[in-house]
Image (tube, helix red, strand yellow):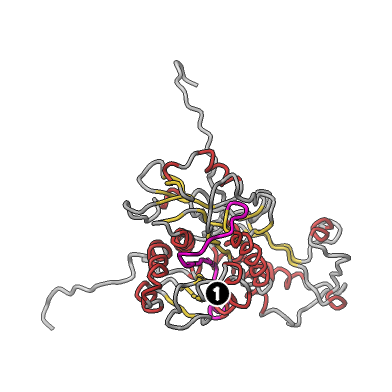
Amino acid sequence: MRPGVSVNISNGNLGLQGPSENGISVLLVAAPAAPTAGYGVAFLVSNIAEVKTAFAHADNAPVVTAIEKGFYAKAPEGTKLYVLAMAQATTLATLIGAANAEKALMLAGGSSRLMAVVKFPSNVYAPTIANGFDEDVDAAVTAAQTLADTWKAKNKGFRAFIQGFGFTNAGAAKDYSAATSRNVGIVVGSLADSTATATLLALGTAAAVAPQQNIGRVKNGSLPIAAATSVKIGAVSADLVSSADLNTLHTKRYITFEKNEIAAGYVWNDDLMLTATTDDFNNLRNGRVIDNAQRVVYAAYYEELKDDVEVDENGRMDIIVEKALETKIQAAIDQQMRGQLATKKDGTSDVTVLVNPDTTAYAALYAKNNIVSPNLNLIQSETVYLFIFLKPKGCLKYINIYLGLTASSI
């Protein structure tokens, strides 16, 4: 071959990210017309073109708009959205009941991390208002938490957004600050008079950001809402809602819009779940992280089930085996969840594992987990006790600044 210059193109250098499994979502919707798959049949879409095909009937234009301007306005195309549509008159609570919701959850194979439930009732629908919303909203919260608890027991947890349909005013809204619906959030607000679009924008935001991030993170920029779009909280323009009402909604644990104070547009006020501030999972980010950790822990230890292991002279599992179990889960969580947790000085995820801790020194820990008379003799009990603690990342929510002048050095 003659002398010459050879130019070779390399690929894969930009670090471009495809859709994350953390964004896999379920949408339950009461639609004006049956989708192509039919009412009550779960199906998968992963881009706007597929949404338009799935909801091709002209009467479903509002559904297409809500998914396009809501979910896929923030979630990257390619993000999996498992959908189940029911008849237009179906309530939110019925949609998210097990008989319907589990069709979509099972189609997703338990991989879905997020869920939203919305409805598009007829123009003559008159909501029955209770606690500041269509009474269907509170009923849906209860049904959603029941469903979430069921799937948590299957080690396939998820977090759900409920459409704040029929919102009237902050003062009348139910106070969820002492509730226990830690897997559920209510989205208050509308885009172009669609509360469904606002709800799906919250879902899409969660699907787009890292699990440990607050959906209201200002550094992520303003929400992708066209400048001409009407943004409201109830009947009031979001720009005109009083600080007092926004504070009331926040205190009562609702997710809603607030103005971005350093750029045009809006951000979410917070990632509030419907439970007390003393609950470890009072926010979406901690809930998503623990859901992921539960999946990792289950998968890591399932293959250890019914294995034969060495024991010491007292029948306790050999210390080498215990250490192996400890190291296994630390490595698995660090490999699959790095970045979602606080890190140790060596850069690994901050995970503490106690395998068969001393029953006297850790008596309170056993008691807290309702373990009565733990027996570390594996031959007798056939049981190993593992306590796993994850340190979450912090979240800058209250920044107190003390600003002044000085005539001399401090």
Q: Residues within 10 Å of mark 1 (few under 14, many from 20)?
A: some
Q: Is 306 in front, or is 6?
A: 306
Q: Is residue 160 left or right of residue 76?
A: right
In this picture, is 311 found above or below 131?
below
> Residue farthest to the front?
124
> Residue farthest to the top?
407
Quadrant assignment, res 17: bottom left
What amino acid is at disc 1?
Ser
Q: Is 201 in front, or is 35?
A: 35
In this picture, is 134 found above or below 34?
above
Who's the residue at 43% across and 59% down the image?
194
Q: Which residue is mark 1?
A: 111
Would residue 72 be visible to someone looking at this image?
yes
Q: Is residue 157 left or right of residue 83?
A: right
Quadrant assignment, res 162: bottom right
Residue 398 lies, in percent from the top left, at 54, 40
In this picture, is 68 found above or below 84?
above
Q: Is residue 131 magenta?
A: yes
Q: Secondary structure at mark 1?
A: loop
Who's the residue at 65% across and 65% down the image?
145
Chain part drawn in magenta: 107-132
Residue 64 lies, in percent from the top left, at 39, 70
Would residue 217 be visible to someone looking at this image?
no
Who's the residue at 88% across and 72% down the image?
314
Predominant SS along the magenta part: loop
Residue 354 lies, in percent from the top left, at 73, 62
Q: Is 350 in front, or is 287?
A: 287
Q: Quadrant of the N terminus?
A: bottom left
Quadrant assignment, res 198: bottom left
Residue 74 lies, in percent from the top left, at 40, 61
